Amino acid sequence: MTDLARCLAEAYAVALPHRRDGKVADYIPALAAVDPMQFGMALALPDGTLHVEGDADTPFSIQSVSKVFTLALALRRIGSDLWTSVGREPSGSAFNSVVQLESEQGIPRNPLINAGAIATTDRLIDGRDGDAVADEILAFMRARAGDPGVEIDLDVAASEARTGARNRSLAYFMDAFGNLRHPVETVVGVYFRQCAIAMSCRQLARAGLFLAMEGRDPLTGEQLVDPHRARRINAIMMLCGHYDNSGEFAFRVGLPGKSGVGGGILCIAPGQGAIAVWSPGLNEAGTSLAGAIALEHFAYAAGWSVFD
Ligand code: GLN
């Protein structure tokens, strides 16, 4: 049997020297202050086993990793009608790009770029108060993490709100095309808070388990999304989870993943488990540089790939 703890330790050791190679996101001032030398990994298995390395218990800003969870929540709430508001094709452009929105009439390419995540959050709101929806997202993350201590970092949320001209532009653009059902400030207010959720690798890996287990949280027994939906969320992660770096990640890691500009990556190995890594230094596309190296080595050593 593969010694997964050893694979994790090896991947950690291989990636550790690369921490300095990436660049910490500085367009959100609260993220610019993060120490780039921190590095953590966690592997969650469906039987509840958790293996960890490094700074696996330090909370970090999950940022765009939250988009996977709001996608699951939106699909659960409104079902396939979500796909009238957002597509499911890779964008091949930056996470905050505005260009495609014009040619594609305000329908974002997929739910994992900023515009698509904002459209998804808009549909998740579904006529409710923004605070109630932010609470729902936080409660979902706490339940998935199995930890009521998960919080929204309000400093990060405020920092994003202060510097969020670009995300507001995306939202106004969609609004102009009639693809937003709630006021821009309500929608981005929820979006900034979901991005500012702080979680550790241990919590995030645990939270991703339901996607590895056909939509069922193996530790609580809850069926959170239908099996076919979990498969489709994984398909979208595989094709769109790293923006214009998604092909490279699929090529190197071979597993669905979602990155965030806080330096976290959640990676799903269907039927096997979930892996979370965190290293704040990013590559040019906004994916953790050392984190992607660690996942490449882990997947290779463990023999985990969706292309078996
Ligand atoms: N909150 C960030 C933003 O909207 C999320 C981007 C990301 O993690 N790629 O710009």
Image (tube, grey):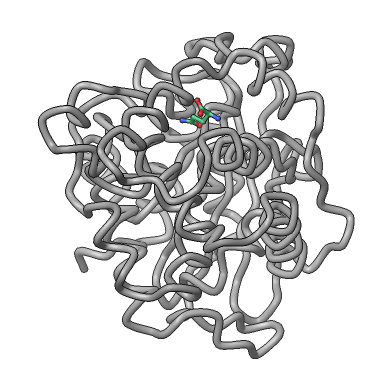
In the image, is 192 to the left or to the right of 231?
A: right
Identify which residue is drawn at 36% across, 37% down. Answer: 175
Identify which residue is drawn at 79% across, 34% down. Answer: 153
Task: From the top left corner, tell me how far across and down residue 185 is, in percent.
Answer: 59, 33
Q: Is residue 217 above or below residue 97?
A: below
Say whether residue 225 is visible: yes
Residue 222 sits in quarter:
bottom right
Residue 289 sits in quarter:
top left
Which residue occupies the foreground of this view, 24 or 197? Answer: 197
State the residue lying farthest toward the right. 149
Figure quadrant of the C terminus: bottom left
Which residue occupies the foreground of this view, 284 or 12? Answer: 284
Identify which residue is drawn at 43% across, 73% down. Answer: 78
Which residue occupies the foreground of this view, 135 or 285? Answer: 135
In the image, is 279 to the left or to the right of 112?
A: right
In the image, is 240 to the left or to the right of 149?
A: left
Say whether residue 11 is visible: no
Q: Is residue 122 above or below residue 217?
A: above
The number of numbered discs placed on residues in the rendered structure image is 0
Task: From the top left corner, tell me how far across and down residue 283 is, in percent.
Answer: 40, 19
Identify which residue is drawn at 56% across, 63% down. Answer: 208
Task: From the top left corner, tell me how far across and down residue 247 is, in percent.
Answer: 20, 39
In the image, is 307 to the left or to the right of 138?
A: left
Task: From the top left corner, tell me how far across and down residue 42 is, in percent.
Answer: 65, 52
